Amino acid sequence: MRLPCPHCGWRDLAEFVCRGDAAPRRPDGLAASPDAMSRYVLERDNPAGPLREHWFHAHGCRAWFEIERDTRTHAITRDGAP
Ligand SMILES: [Zn+2]
């Protein structure tokens, strides 16, 4: 599998780290309840189909970016280009 880094172009998957679903937003750590923080850290949807994900180009430019990937086919349906 290859991924499109917005800075480096298409690169091998081995260069990247996936953080997962880009939709959840971190709750305010001081105001959030333990249950809200637990849901943020531990509970994620696992959809079959398009999913926006955070990726880190760990062995490249070290940039974070988002792409949309179909989890059934691994097709990139929207790249992280600005
Ligand atoms: Zn890069």
Image (tube, rainbow, N blue to C red):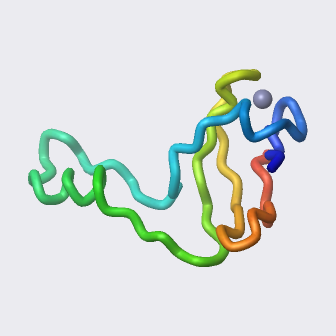
Looking at this view, is 69 or 28 the one in front? 69
Ligand 1 quarter of the rendering: top right
Residue 43 against residue 29 in the figure, above or below: below
Residue depicted at x 76% and y 48%: 80
Q: Residue furthest right?
A: 9
Residue 64 rendering spot, x and y as whole percentages: 63, 35
Give how far across and how far down residue 49 sits, in percent: 65, 77
Q: Position of residue 7 (x, y in %)?
A: 83, 31
Left or right: where does residue 24 sit relative to residue 60?
Answer: left
Q: Residue at x 29, y 50 (%)?
A: 41
| Residue drawn 51% across the image and 44% down it | 19
Location of the C terminus by quadrant is: top right
Front-lying residue, 36 or 70: 70
Q: Residue at x 20, y 51 (%)?
A: 37
The vertical placement of 71 against 25, above or below, is: below
Judge by depth and name the residue closer to the eye, 38 or 72: 72
